[in-house]
Amino acid sequence: MLAIPKIRKIVLRNEHVRMMLEEVHRVYPQEACGVILGQFEPDIARAQEVVFTRNAADSSVRFVVDAEELYRILVRAEDEGKDMVGIFHSHPTTAVPSGVDQPFMEINPVVWVILGTLSEKIDISAYQWFDNAIYPVEIVIENLEEDIGK
């Protein structure tokens, strides 16, 4: 198993954030969820792909990723040389970890990107469980056009 380092920031492309917002609106009022695949650098998680999953809990206050679906995603990621660097989900409130999130963050200490749906403004934040505590993670959004040379 990959030892997850303490992450200072997660780098997402603007396309990833746009897709997350679309998924949140698509499944609302249920919580949206998915995994973020990419690479770990010394204290950075660099996203290459966001894969949305069905919320098996079918709930507006918690999410469950189906184990078989997650397994298929992780096998493909490994074949492509990618790691699961993050977990994405939405909240019907603000973008902070809930009491329900914490025990799952402990067993999945990747970056947790949360998109809150309480206000009209984009409320997105990231956190990581590390050394028995939850730490905020800076989100850096890169422009996709710059990435492809436009």
Image (cartoon, helix red, strand yellow):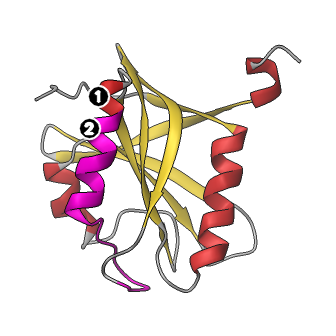
- Disc 2 is placed on an element classified as helix
Question: In the image, which disc is placed on residue 75?
Answer: 2
Q: How crowded is mark 2: few (under 14 residues within 10 Å), some or many (20 or more)?
A: few
- Disc 1 is placed on an element classified as helix
90 left or right of 28 in image: left
95 left or right of 132 in image: right
Q: Which residue is drawn at 28% across and 41% down?
A: 74
Q: Do the residues labelled 1 and 2 touch (CB within 8 Å)?
A: yes
Residue 30 is inside the magenta segment: no
**Quarter where residue 7 is shown:** top left
**Amino acid type assigned to the residue bearing label 1 in the image:** Glu
Where residue 57 sits: x, y (%)? 31, 81
**Quarter where residue 101 is shown:** bottom left
Res 110 seen here: no
Residue 64 is inside the magenta segment: yes
Res 71 seen here: yes
Q: Residue at x 10, y 29 (%)?
A: 1
Q: Which residue has dot 1 on it?
A: 78
116 left or right of 72 in image: right
**Amino acid type assigned to the residue bearing label 2 in the image:** Val
Q: Which of 123 and 23 is in front in this view?
A: 23
Q: Residue at x 80, y 20 (%)?
A: 146
Q: Nearer the viewer, residue 50 or 130?
A: 50
| Start-end of magenta stretch | 58-76
Where residue 66 sits: x, y (%)? 26, 66
24 left or right of 36 in image: right
